[in-house]
Every structure is written in C-alpha cells, then in structure tokens.
Amino acid sequence: MAPFGTLPDGRPVQLVTLTNARGMTVRAMERGATIVGIHAPDRHGHLADIVLGFDDLAGYLGDTAYLGAVVGRVANRLGHARFTLDGVTHLVTANRAPHALHGGTCGFDQRLWRAEAVVDGAGAHARFHYVSADGEEGYPGTLDVHATYTLTDANELHVAFRATTDRATPVNLAQHAYFNLSGVADATSAPDILGHVLTLDADRYTPVGAGLIPTGEIASVAVTPFDFRTPVPIGARIDAAHPQLALAGGYDQNFVITRTGPGLAHAAHVHEPRSGRTIDVLTTEPGVQFYAGNFLDGSARGKRGIAYGRRSGFCLETQRFPDAPNRPEFPDIVLRPGATYHATTVFRFGVAP
C-alpha cells in the first residue's frame, strides 16, 4: 500500500497495487474503493492501462462520472428518489432530480473505505470495508459493506461484495469501471470504443422511460439494436432510430442475463480488434448495465491529461435491476437483518489472434 493523497478534511487515502505472476496489475484506492488502473497485455504482450481514470486523487474529487468506483447503496436509478418498504415511504437524495442515481449526492463512490492488502494461494487481494450509517442519503439501516478485489495468475479480476444490515434496506452494489481495451492511457488522445466488438448473453432487457427510469417491462432484444447475442461492434447500431437509444443518447440499458442456474453465469465478451485484448464477464447477478459513455463530453482530463470524450469508455455494470424497490415485477433487492448480501463478478482478461 502507498499514499494516494489527502481528502479536503485531512484524511489520508491509500492505494493498493495488486500484481500477478504474469505481470498484470490492478490498482485501487480507498476513496470509493475505486479501481484506478488495470494494466493488461495485448496480443504482443505489451501491457497498457485499459480503464479510464486520473493520475492523482485531485482528479477523482472533481469526477462526476463514477470512474472506477463502487456505486451504492443502491446502484443505478431510483425513480422519484423514493421507495416504500414494510409500509414506510423513504425519501432519498434526488441527485438527478427528481430521481436518485448511484446512491445519492455522497454515495459509496465518494466515501472513504479502509483497505488491507493480502496475498495467499488464491491470488493477491485488496479488501475494502465501509460502514454506511442509518439514514445516510435517506436509506434506512446501518449497512456493513465489504468489497474485495482479487487478481489471479490467470489474469482474472474477481470483484466480491458482502454486506449485512441491522434494519431492512434495499442494496444493489456495482463496480463502475470504464474500459477501453485500446490502452487509452498510453494514447495521445482517447480513442472511442465504437470498434470494440460486444457479445451479451441476454435475450431480454428492461426498457426505460423519461429520466431513464425503467417502465417495468422486460422486453425481447430480438429485431432491435439491443440484440448482442452474436458479436456486433458497439458502434454498428448505436445511433439507430430507436426510441430507447434516443432517450439515453446511445446504449445505457440494463440487460437481463440468460442463465440456467445459480452461481456464476457468462454475461459478456468484448474484443478490441486492433490490440487483440478481450474481456469476458461472469457474474452471480441477474443484470448488466451496458453503458457506452454517451455522457462523457471531454471536459474531464484524465491520465496524462487526456480528454475523455463521448464514448471513449464503456461500462459493464453487473447489478440487480434498477428501480427494483418500486417495481414489484423485478426481483427483490431488500436485505434484512440476519441475511447477507453476496455478489461476485469475474472480469477475465485475454487476447485474441
């Protein structure tokens, strides 16, 4: 572990660096349990940073795009910043008025977690811990949260969440890394991700309405721009004339992962043809939010001063369905005392010829 700066209130922030036997590295800091960098090899063995971020803590303090952070207590959107639980209506922070996004004005992405680094037979681990107080951002219950990043010698990054509560509360945690498999941090300008080829193991998705709040429908992807069941470049249909794409300015939808049973299911495969880099995503979660960086606008200058323009990174946010507390047709996300929230996602990095 090493220092990564100091918060405005004087609290120090530590950075954990994980390295495996093949030279791959993952760096994560305590603020937001944020993944700061992932160096992965291309087809020639060249290591490059494949996630968007900043060179220092100051950049993250001004970030509004959740680059690399853990988002929660409830990831994604919560309609009209409210929900009713056990007959009581709770109002949470409407940071995207009139709705809530990714936990509120000061969600888990901005909180100071505490980290420890551990190496054992399973790999190198960065373990983060945070206690979210009862009433924080309007959510009930004290939530005790653990996030563990494990880098294996098979070039896999395992992201594991665990949480317990003393009072019933909705919980939905997600890792919000923006990927660009070109190795954006080594470029002179940020290339877009439109040439990345995406496959999603999803027959259905959850359409949205105004404010990108789900309508409650679970719709087929067939004969739509959302059909990634076979490999398609991200840019091939992103600007197609479809009302869902118009609402989001491109892809920013939750896909329902096709699974045959519990445990890890394959959710996505991404291939960047020029570098040969690939990612496979496996998860225990029912959904994955595919976001194509539509709202990046070049105002944020990231690593080495590179401007992150529109669609210069993509996210695959494995998650429970957005606005679930307000949608009885969606799987329940309420965690109750005595139960434990578990969620695991594996990012498997590779290369193609």
Image: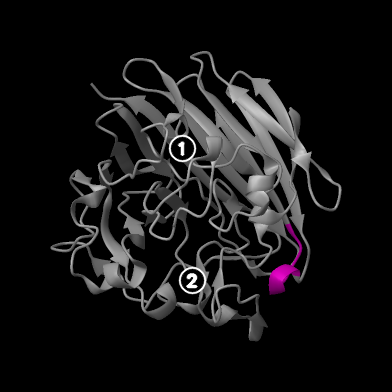
Q: Is residue 47 visible?
A: yes
Element under label 1?
Answer: strand
Which residue reaches farthest right? 10
Q: Position of residue 220 (x, y in %)?
A: 22, 65
Point 44% across, 64% down: residue: 321
Q: Amino acid at mark 1?
A: Val
| Residue named by callout 2 | 324
Whether residue 87 is situated above or below residue 312 in the rendered picture = below
Q: Which residue is mark 1?
A: 346
Count residues near mark 2 (Cα–Cα under 10 Å), then give few for <14, some for 14-19, many for 20+.
many
Q: Nearer the viewer, residue 206 or 101?
A: 101
Left or right relative to 11: residue 98: left
N-terminal of the pair, mark 1 or mark 2, is: 2
Which residue: 22% across, 45% down?
233
Q: Position of residue 164 (x, y in %)?
A: 70, 56
Question: Eyeballing the image, is 40 above or below 159?
Answer: above
154 on left or right of 115 = left
Disc ID at residue 96: none
Q: Position of residue 341 (x, y in %)?
A: 60, 54
How much space separates mark 1 and mark 2, taking CA atoms? 24 Å
Q: How many marks?
A: 2
- x 40%, y 75%: residue: 329
Is residue 139 in view from this perspective?
Answer: no
Q: Position of residue 114 (x, y in %)?
A: 76, 42
Type of colouring: one colour
Residue at x 76%, y 71% (from the top left corner): 135
| Magenta highlight range | 136-143
Residue 198 vs 23, above or below: the answer is below
Q: Nearer the viewer, residue 66 or 203?
A: 66
Q: Amino acid at mark 2?
A: Ala
The quarter of the picture where the N terminus appears is: top right
Element on which disc 2 rests: helix
